[in-house]
Image (cartoon, rainbow, N blue to C red):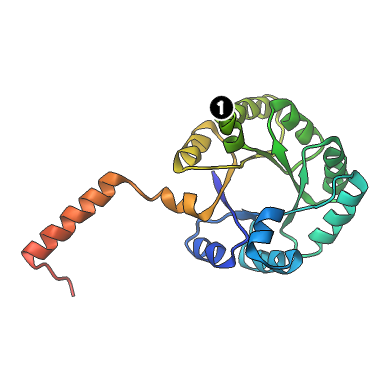
């Protein structure tokens, strides 16, 4: 499973990228706002750091304007994936942009039916929002599984990009179900390294090292 990092914070992206933990980046207007920088400027810098897809979201809601904005965004770098919402207008924009050779990430997916439409419109990625479904007591992982089954049944090439990831367990479950990609905040990716028994074992090792006065150099 590929890891995308869901942030516009340059230092966090660079740290994870240097460790080989980043296969791409997802951004949205909220994350750009949090960074406090111009959308085109920060997106260009992200694209210079990461070789994989960088999702940059349109701000329009009508198809024609989405297409115009998408064309502008893809001028930033070759690895831009234009991010459009899963609306009828978004699907129209997806079809045009994908036919022109752009990577397209269709976001705000909450049903398998929506995912089928996105695949037929030529989406490169479909982004089902796991955490937001969990918030309303609907199993977000069940949606990932449904999309996986449907896509496999019919050979759709659209990649399942699990989004709204809230925990390390979400990452594990996405990998088990077969999501192609999971995008998560830096803190969630780092949390995957943590385990209480690792901490306990390390604490004991350090005590034994001190007691035995062990030195390597």
Q: Quadrant of the C terminus?
A: bottom left
Q: Is residue 31 above or below residue 107?
A: below
Spot occupied by residue 72 in the image (x, y as percentages of width and height): 85, 60
**Which residue is at 56% across, 26% downward?**
137
**Which residue is at 76% across, 41% downward?**
123
**Which residue is at 54% across, 66% downward?**
14
| Left or right side of 92 for 76 | left
Instruction: Name the residue at the bottom extreme.
Output: 217
Spot occupied by residue 122 in the image (x, y as percentages of width and height): 80, 39
Q: Quadrant of the N terminus?
A: top right
Q: Answer yes or no: is residue 71 visible.
A: yes
- The quadrant in which residue 38 appears is bottom right
- The quadrant in which residue 78 appears is bottom right
Q: Which residue is mark 1?
A: 139
Q: Answer yes or no: is residue 27 visible.
A: no
Give the SS element for disc 1: loop
- The quadrant in which residue 142 appears is top right
């Amino acid at each position: 499973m590929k890891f995308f990092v869901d942030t516009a914070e340059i230092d966090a992206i660079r740290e994870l990228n240097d460790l080989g933990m980043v296969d791409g980046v997802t951004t949205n207007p909220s994350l750009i706002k949090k960074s406090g920088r111009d959308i085109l400027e920060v997106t260009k810098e992200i694209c210079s750091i990461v070789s994989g897809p960088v999702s940059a979201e349109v701000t329009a809601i009508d198809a024609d304007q989405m297409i115009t904005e998408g064309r502008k965004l893809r001028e930033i770098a070759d690895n831009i994936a234009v991010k459009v919402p899963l609306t009828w207008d978004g699907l129209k924009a997806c079809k045009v942009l994908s036919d022109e050779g752009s990577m397209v990430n269709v976001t705000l997916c909450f049903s398998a039916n929506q995912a089928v439409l996105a695949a037929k419109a030529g989406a490169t990625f479909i982004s089902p929002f796991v955490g937001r479904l969990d918030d309303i007591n609907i199993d977000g992982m069940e949606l990932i599984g449904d999309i996986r089954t449907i896509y496999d049944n019919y050979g759709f090439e659209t990649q399942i990009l699990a989004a709204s990831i809230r925990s390390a367990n979400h990452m594990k479950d996405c990998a088990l179900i077969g999501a192609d990609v999971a995008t998560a905040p830096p803190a969630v990716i780092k949390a995957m390294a943590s385990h209480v028994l690792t901490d306990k074992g390390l604490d004991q090792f350090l005590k034994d090292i001190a007691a035995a006065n062990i030195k390597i150099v």
